[in-house]
Amino acid sequence: MPQAAEENLGPSLSATADRDNDPAIEVENLSKRYETVDAVKDFTFSLERGTIAGFLGPNGSGKTTTLRLLLGLAEPTAGDALVFGSRYRQLDRPARRVGAVLESSDLHPGRSGRDHLRALALTADAGIDFKRVDEVLELVELAAAADRRVGTYSLGMRQRLSLAGALLGDPDLLILDEPTNGLDPAGIRWLRRFLRRFADRGGTVLISSHALAEIAQTVDQVVIIDGGRVVATRRLDELVRGGQSLEEAYLELTERPVPE
Amino acid sequence: MISTLRAELLKQLSVRTNQGLLAATLGIVAFAVALHGFTLPADDLGTFENQVMVFGRGELLGTLFAALLGALSITGEFRHGTIRPTLIAMPRRGRIMAAKACVSALLGAGLGLVASALAAAVGTAALSSRGIDLQLDGGDYALLIAGGAAAAGFWAAIGVGVGALVRNQVATLVGLSAWILFVEGIVVGDLPEVGRFTPGAAGAALGGLAPDTLLAPAIALGLIALYTVAALSAGGSAFAQRDAI
């Protein structure tokens, strides 16, 4: 994997990355029903490559379910959730295309950060060597704590370790669920700059968050969902036209009484 | 696939769970065999059947802890949420399942080997110290230890299958323990004609235990292999089809 060795952040403009012109993410009429609850109902949106999109919505609005469907962890009841034109489970070596963090607590407390990443690198079976593990540890500034058990990590350190895992395969698309949780202000600024550089190099980011002030500084585009439906998909500068803040626009879109 | 196997091996060796299981197995095996070997009446311990039964505690406990090891390899991923990063990195669930079954079987067999060997050693020492004649020859010892290793290996894979099916860690561990320690004992005791076809009895038969009641080792080997395939198929199909949370 020479590309990862020479450049340790951001997607490489390799031949495979732009072989096709499918959007990075394409969600079409996506629905997911659990028992009697529609977690996601008829979602449609897409994300062009090279953009950072905020995925916003109240708790329980279907954000995490959508991300799980995109990542092949759950199967849709109807519709499609495609990544680079394929269902996730059909991607070849997905770790090379997509990195994702759904929950920063998805770590074994008894395992060291380094072993977590090594196990993940081997699991991916995508030619990710242990040198790359050391690189991503440096990148998220965890090299000094790498041999400590994860149980001793702070929330911010776990968040960074999870992000390091997502970056192992030097992916083209990052999917992050609430990545700023537990990060200190320096960490948040670091993440914002990191994501901007990632996108400037052609990478695509879908980032779910409730931290609207932070999101407004980071994203180009927003997808707002509420009550299981997509209520807005547009460029950030179009949404906040007329001096409105993202927070005001968001609350206007999501607090409207839903007609029965 | 080699890479996925290495990943699973690293996962299982990078936490202290399995070291804890090994220590618990050895401690309990030594205690149980010593208790029987030193306290049962000398007359009872004189027969081949009873000597093998006492030495067979190693097989039983090795099997139990190997089943728990296999079950932990999959239920631990659900419990700690690591199943998400695992499946995001490698969405081919059949491959993840196969790697867990292979690595657990290997480590489980190792656990069973050590447990059976320790049981034989402690049992032999206990009987010798009381001047009781040993009825086992070298071949009996070899069968006991090899059978104990094989039974534990199969049961570790069965544990992976059951764990994938049940998912909940506590329920899986309690269910496997209850089955191996109590349910099978009752069935074999009360209904030996049926009981000897249960998976635990087949595992015990591999080591040559209770030859009058249980199946011959070669037949038991085929039977426990079938149980293992069935458990892995059921667990693997549930794992492949169900939402991974």
Image (cartoon, grey):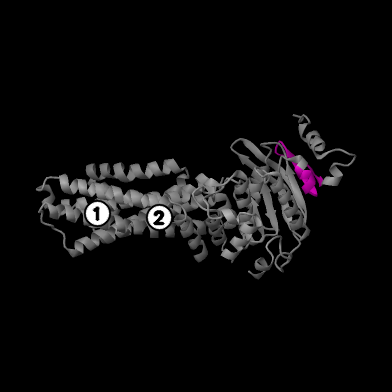
Location of residue A259 in the rendering, given as x and y in whole percent from the top left corner: 77, 30
Which residue is located at x 50 percent, y 44 percent?
B79
The single residue placed furthest to the bottom in the displayed view is A2
- The magenta region covers A214-234
Report the residue marked by disc 2: B157
Report the residue marked by disc 1: B119
* CB atoms of marks 1 and 2 within 8 Å: no
Which residue is located at x 21 percent, y 61 percent?
B141
Q: Quadrant of residue B86?
A: bottom right
Location of residue B180 in the rendering, given as x and y in whole percent from the top left corner: 32, 46
Q: Is residue A204 above or below residue A252?
A: below
Mark 1 vs mark 2: tell me if same chain: yes
Camera-side residue: B200 or A151? A151
Q: Is residue A128 visible to us here?
A: no
Q: Amino acid at mark 2?
A: Ala
Q: Is residue B8 left or right of residue B222?
A: right
> Of callouts 1 and 2, which one flags the residue occurring earlier in the amino acid sequence?
1
Chain letter for the residue marked with disc 2 in the picture: B
Q: Tag 2, which secondary structure?
A: helix
Location of residue B163 in the rendering, given as x and y in whole percent from the top left corner: 44, 48
